[in-house]
Image: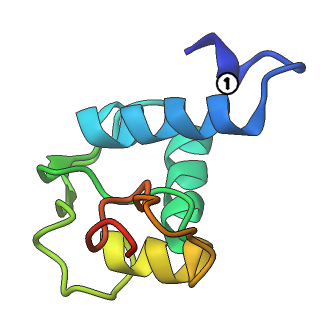
């Protein structure tokens, strides 16, 4: 979690921490900046919604990744299209779990 506040943190480390907080629901219960950043990362396809839905600090429901339509914001398919596209090499697996190993 310290990657969020370290100036020398790598982007991959920060994204991994945000994805963890989204997965566990912590992102929606922390200070507003964290939740807004998490939502921005989801909307840009750098993170996906958690497996399970969660309630935020105010009681609003944030759906899980399988509760949204495939290909829409927050789904693994959306993240794959936005960030991976067709950049995978043969035998490489999508980090978002969208699809199978590329042949």
Q: Position of residue 43 (x, y in %)?
A: 52, 73
Quadrant position of the N terminus in the picture: top right
Q: Secondary structure at mark 1?
A: helix
**Residue at (31%, 70%) from the top-left corner?**
98
Q: How many residues crowd mark 1 within 10 Å: few (<14), some (14–19), many (20+)?
A: some
Q: Say above or below: 69 vs 74.
A: below
Figure colour scheme: rainbow
Q: Say above or below: 99 vs 57.
A: below
Q: Position of residue 41 (x, y in %)?
A: 57, 59
Q: How many marks are shown on the rendered structure? A: 1
Q: Quadrant of residue 8?
A: top right
Is residue 7 found left or right of 21 in the rendered image? right
Q: Position of residue 37 (x, y in %)?
A: 61, 51
Q: Quadrant of residue 69?
A: bottom left
**Residue at (35%, 34%) from the top-left corner?**
29
**Residue at (50%, 60%) from the top-left corner?**
39
**Residue at (46%, 74%) from the top-left corner?**
80
Q: Is residue 23 visible?
A: yes
Quadrant position of the C terminus in the picture: bottom left
Q: Say above or below: 72 vs 8.
A: below
Q: Residue furthest right?
A: 8
Q: Nearer the viewer, residue 73 or 37?
A: 73
Q: Is residue 44 visible?
A: no
Q: Which residue is mark 1?
A: 4
Q: Position of residue 2 (x, y in %)?
A: 64, 11
Q: Say above or below: 76 vs 1.
A: below
Is residue 21 found left or right of 88 in the rendered image? left
Q: Residue furthest top?
A: 2
Is residue 82 found left or right of 75 in the rendered image? right
């Amino acid at each position: 979690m310290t990657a969020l506040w370290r100036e020398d943190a790598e982007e991959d480390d920060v994204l991994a921490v945000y994805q963890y907080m989204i997965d566990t629901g912590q992102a929606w219960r922390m200070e507003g900046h964290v939740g807004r950043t998490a939502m921005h990362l989801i909307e840009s396809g750098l993170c996906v919604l958690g497996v399970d839905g969660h309630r935020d600090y105010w009681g609003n429901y944030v759906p899980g990744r399988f509760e949204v339509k495939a290909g829409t914001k927050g789904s693994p398919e959306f993240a794959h299209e936005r960030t991976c596209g067709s950049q995978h090499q043969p035998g490489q697996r999508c980090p978002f779990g969208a699809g199978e190993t590329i042949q």
